[in-house]
Amino acid sequence: IAEARQVAMYLMRQKAGASYPMIGAHLGGRDHSTVIHACQCIERRRKEDARMRLTLEEVSKRFGPRLG
């Protein structure tokens, strides 16, 4: 569940341009620093892990080129 939430945070930031506080508020009242950490973790994994890149691409396709 934590990984899915981090992916959601990352995509909300990348695809919708949502602010860190807004993302945190929508995902269980998380602090903005938690969202920043999640985005950094997913970005690092995206660069290093082909499976994560594929996951992000597949999930992104379901939402189109830009959310919101």
Image (tube, rainbow, N blue to C red):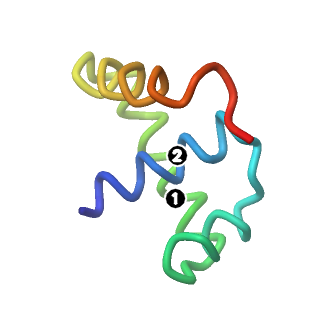
Locate the N terminus and report the quarter of the image it occupies: bottom left
Q: To which residue does mark 1 refer?
A: 37
Do labels 1 and 2 touch, CB within 8 Å?
yes
**Residue at x 53%, y 45% (from the top left corner):** 10
Can you give x and y, in whole percent of width and height, for residue 35 in the image? 57, 62
- x%, y% of residue 5? 39, 58
Image coordinates of residue 26 in percent, x first then y, are 60, 71
Q: Residue 49 in the image: x percent, y percent?
A: 27, 23
Q: Residue 29, relative to residue 41: is it above or below?
A: below
Quadrant in which the C terminus appears? top right
Residue positioned 76% across, 43% down in the render: 17
* Tag 2 secondary structure: helix
Q: Is residue 10 left or right of residue 57?
A: right
User: What numbered label is drawn on residue 40?
Assistant: 2
Q: Distance between the Cα atoms at labels 1 and 2?
A: 5 Å
Q: Amino acid at mark 1?
A: His
Identify which amino acid the numbered label 2 is placed on.
Answer: Gln
Residue 45 against residue 12 in the figure, above or below: above
Q: Secondary structure at mark 1?
A: helix
In percent of the image, x 57 and y 83: which residue is there? 29
